[in-house]
Image (cartoon, rainbow, N blue to C red):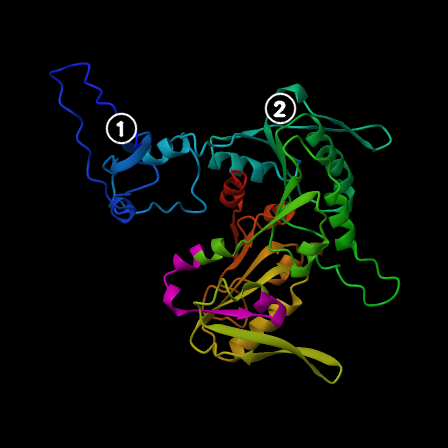
Amino acid sequence: MAATRPNIPSQNPNSHALKPLKPISISQSLLKFPSLESSNKIRRQCINSRCEITSFEFDKPKNWSDPVRIIQPFSPISNSMPAASASSMNSPTKNVKRVCLFYCDDTKALAERVAAESDAIELRSINWRTFDDGFPNLFIPNAQGIRGQHVAFLASFSSPGVIFEQLSVIYALPKLFISSFTLVLPFFPTGTSERMEDEGDVATAFTLARILSNIPISRGGPTSLVTFDIHALQERFYFGDNILPCFDSGIPLLKNRLQQLPDSDNISVAFPDDGAWKRFHTQLQHFPTIVCAKVREGDKRIVRIKEGDPAGRHVVIVDDLVQSGGTLIECQRVLAAHGATKISAYVTHGIFPNRSWERFEYDNGGNPDNGLTYFWITDSCPITVRAVKNKPPFEVLSLAGSIAATLQI
């Protein structure tokens, strides 16, 4: 015999019987999804021990047509930012990371500029003392005060004599129970010594990479290494798994400066060799390009234009670094001989050993064969910055904004 369902009366005789709602299809309901952040209110009616989805309702989205806000890469993170940006930075999804920034003597000025970019960066000093025999006698003040903090160190390996004392601090900081450790080394100094052409050659770039790869791990994991425009692209593969290299570039600073020039619409970019072209052409591809090359004529190697036309243009020679400056000067002469009206230069790292920056004259009268209109460098090499300060044609583009932004990653 078929079972019959008992007629269960309502507890309130005046109440109305529930009326089943008309089910809607999933495709119809999905059309009402405005955002993942809206609240999902699901009404269900249980009949015969079954739950039937009857409708989906969502809160009205807020500011559905608002444009996406683009954050500039070098904008400082400070209390003076717009209210909307400050609100988003204080939201649970994106909190400002407070960083204790240590520095060496050479990078003090740069560290101060980095701290000025963001209220979230606090400068901390180190006592750089020495014993009577000349070996380092170092001290980190208030070491317990950085426990649980994000810590960074701004280094400058400007000479072999200062590397050991800085490495001692770099190895000590991650072991002070800090949350994370970032090493900012704007200029990787052994970058030009990465080749082994003869048996017995020592690739010091690989040696330094191995030393940095063995920095102790902090509570937050491996050390993050920030460096700019490393000389040989393959050097990124020299680092081990105990360090996280972040390779940044100073080219955005150059592009921003070029846009400020009165003749910004008449600029061409020249690369002194194929290596510079490989490193930078993708970042500067919207400029007309000139590529130079060194060719051998008898016992001499001279610079010639491989492609492009500098005639009537303000030509900017771009490379990653300069030492003696011989190649840049040869490029300047050949570009002037082919009709360039102005010639400037940019390098991320102005090394200039033995005051070789003195070779570059200032052109203030339209004589590009005799001098440069501008010579832009960054502050990755602090000793050079102090030497060329207020000396035309040199102009320093600071990495401070880029470093401050990278410390928030």
> Residue at label 1?
4
Whether residue 273 appears in this view of the structure is no
In the rendered view, does 34 fall on the left or right side of 398? left
Determine if the magenta segment contains residue 272. Answer: yes
Q: Residue furthest front?
A: 1
- Give the quarter of the image for residue 87: top left
* Magenta region, residue range: 256-278
In the rendered view, does 321 fall on the left or right side of 372? right
Whether residue 258 appears in this view of the structure is yes
**Percent coordinates x, y for residue 55 in the rendering:** 24, 37
Relative to 37, residue 396 above or below: below
In the rendered view, does 63 fall on the left or right side of 15? right
Which amino acid type corresponds to the residue marked 2 in the rendered image?
Answer: Ile
Q: Which residue sits at x=88%, y=65%?
A: 199
Determine if the magenta segment contains residue 163. Answer: no
**Percent coordinates x, y for residue 228 in the rendering:** 60, 51
Dot 1 falls on a residue whose secondary structure is loop
Dot 2 falls on a residue whose secondary structure is helix
Relative to 277, residue 225 above or below: above
**Percent coordinates x, y for residue 74 in the rendering:** 45, 45
> Residue at label 2?
146
Q: Which residue sits at x=37%, y=67%?
A: 265
